[in-house]
């Protein structure tokens, strides 16, 4: 089962290309589901079909779905929110404050991502194509599993959930309240398992591909570079850049103001494409069509020009590890040791970077995105003594903190 996510700046045509990709996969003999997590829900317009919260068959081997986050919220989150209130009330938190603490920003997006995983795991399709929202929404969406996992662990750590016998002492109602607490802990464990599954799905390069759609304009290309950096910071790799609305160059014999405009536009687009070539990512290109491509036949025409005879769902080539730790000096427990935490952040040279140490985590901000990186145990006993950018690699230097190094 493959999952292919399309995202990009609003208005670049990602919905059209996601729908075209799914249609192409179905025509080539594989069953495909294309789903929209974009609040705009224009997927139905692209396919010229009425879509709802459940998969609708569009044609042979092709289905489509709008994920209804409001229905998911009413059906799934309300119950879990009640369980979280039980945990907080048992810890002595005021009921009003407990209500505030159980409201998670972006929970609708998290539930939508869970639906994508459910479709991929149990839906029986060969490929699930996802039309994500605009870039900012997608970055929040793809970063949510890790963020909510941290929220859950701080709220009620796994080691406390594991010792269920302690719950009787925490429950205000004594043994009578224990069944409710058991149900709460079961729900929290299931949430933690789901979040782990989501992170695994997104980070598995052999299973999930992320495609960034852009138009050949300098402003859009600049945002694309920042997005690649931000995704890498989350440990997510971009497979391809998909450049939409490529304009052909006019024939030399064409004269007049229209020809002059076409030549200038074509020249500008080619300059942007040349700059994108320095990002070391495969580039696919879709031509600008005279008529808006809606309906399966028009989408198939777009997909044929985009993919030719290649596999639209094939994973991209493996690249450098997104995070690694290496020793650069000393051996064993020598106090003269030195280590480097290396974060591979494509495009980091073009984005402001910020680092700060927060306990056993490192707060890294790049491309407008902040991530808390949990430090390996050896680095938790070290101090940050420097950082440098080597190409696309952010190298953070650690040396032993002599006060705790030998503990």
Image (cartoon, rainbow, N blue to C red):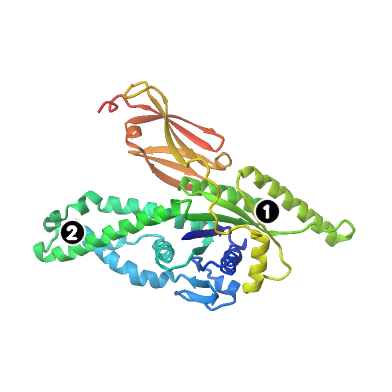
- Which residue, given by chain and number where applicable, does mark 2 sit on? 90
Residue occupying the point 17% across, 52% down: 163
Horizontal side of 151 relative to 138 (left or right) equals left
| Picture coordinates of residue 280, whole percent (x, y) | 61, 44
Mark 2 and mark 1 lie on one chain; the one further toward the N terminus is: 2
Q: Which mark is residue 217?
A: 1
Circle 2 Cα neighbour tier, 10 Å, few/some/many (<14 / 14–19 / ≥20): some
Q: In the image shown, does 39 or 28 lie closer to the viewer?
A: 28
Report if residue 378 is visible in the image.
yes
Where's residue 236, x and y in %? 48, 49
Image side of residue 407 versus residue 73, left or right: left
Q: Is residue 346 above or below residue 249?
A: above
Q: Is residue 94 visible?
A: no
Residue 287 sits above or below residue 229 on the image: below
Quadrant position of residue 19 = bottom right
Q: Is residue 9 rendered to the left or right of residue 76?
A: right
Question: Which one is closest to the eye, mark 2 or mark 1?
Answer: 1
Q: Give the Cα distance between marks 2 and 1.
A: 55 Å
Instruction: Please rate how many residues cluster around mark 1, counting C-alpha atoms within 10 Å: few if below 14, some from 14 to 19, many from 20.
Output: some
Quadrant housing the C terminus: top left
Query: Residue 83: which quarter of the image?
Result: bottom left
Under circle 1, the secondary element is: loop
- Which percent across, then down, holds residue 272? 69, 49
Badge 2 element:
helix
Q: Residue furthest left?
A: 175
> Which residue is rendered at x = 47% and y = 45% of the image?
233
At a point 29% along the width and 51% down the height, the residue shown is 153
Q: Which residue occupies the foreground of this view, 92 or 252? A: 252
Rendered position, 15 above or below 249: below
Q: Number of callouts in the render?
A: 2
């Amino acid at each position: 089962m493959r999952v292919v996510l399309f995202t990009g700046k609003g208005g670049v045509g990602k919905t059209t290309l996601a729908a075209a990709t799914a249609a192409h996969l179905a025509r080539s003999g594989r069953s495909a589901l294309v789903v929209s997590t974009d609040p705009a829900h224009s997927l139905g317009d692209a396919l010229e079909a009425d879509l709802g919260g459940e998969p609708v068959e569009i044609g042979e081997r092709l289905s489509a779905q709008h994920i209804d986050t409001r229905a998911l919220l009413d059906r799934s989150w309300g119950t879990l929110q009640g369980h979280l209130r039980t945990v907080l009330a048992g810890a002595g938190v005021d009921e009003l404050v407990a209500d505030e603490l159980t409201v998670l920003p972006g929970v609708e997006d998290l539930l939508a991502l869970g639906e994508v995983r459910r479709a991929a795991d149990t839906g029986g399709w060969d490929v699930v194509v996802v039309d994500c929202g605009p870039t900012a929404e997608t970055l929040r969406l793809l970063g949510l599993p890790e963020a909510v996992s941290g929220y859950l662990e701080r709220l009620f750590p796994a080691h406390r959930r594991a010792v269920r016998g302690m719950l009787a002492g925490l429950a205000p109602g004594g043994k009578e309240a224990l069944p409710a607490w058991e149900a709460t802990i079961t729900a929290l464990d299931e949430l933690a398992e789901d979040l782990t599954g989501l992170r695994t799905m997104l980070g598995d390069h052999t299973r999930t591909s992320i495609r960034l759609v852009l138009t050949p304009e300098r402003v859009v290309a600049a945002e694309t570079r920042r997005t690649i950096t931000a995704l890498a910071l989350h440990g997510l790799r971009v497979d391809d850049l998909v450049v939409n609305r490529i304009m052909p160059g006019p024939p030399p014999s064409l004269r007049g103001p229209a020809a002059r405009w076409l030549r200038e536009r074509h020249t500008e687009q080619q300059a942007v494409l040349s700059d994108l070539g320095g990002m070391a990512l495969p580039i696919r290109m879709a031509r600008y069509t005279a008529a808006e491509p809606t309906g399966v036949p028009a989408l198939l025409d777009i997909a044929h020009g985009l993919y030719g005879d290649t596999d639209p769902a094939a994973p991209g080539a493996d690249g450098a590890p997104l995070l690694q730790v290496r020793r650069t000096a000393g051996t064993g427990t020598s106090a003269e040791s030195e280590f480097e935490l290396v974060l591979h952040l494509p495009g980091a040279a073009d984005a402001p970077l910020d680092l700060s140490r927060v306990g056993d985590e490192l707060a890294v901000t790049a491309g407008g995105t902040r991530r808390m990186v949990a430090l390996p145990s050896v680095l938790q006993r070290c101090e940050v003594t420097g950082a440098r950018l080597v190409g696309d690699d952010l190298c953070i230097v650690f040396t032993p903190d002599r006060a705790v190094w030998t503990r």
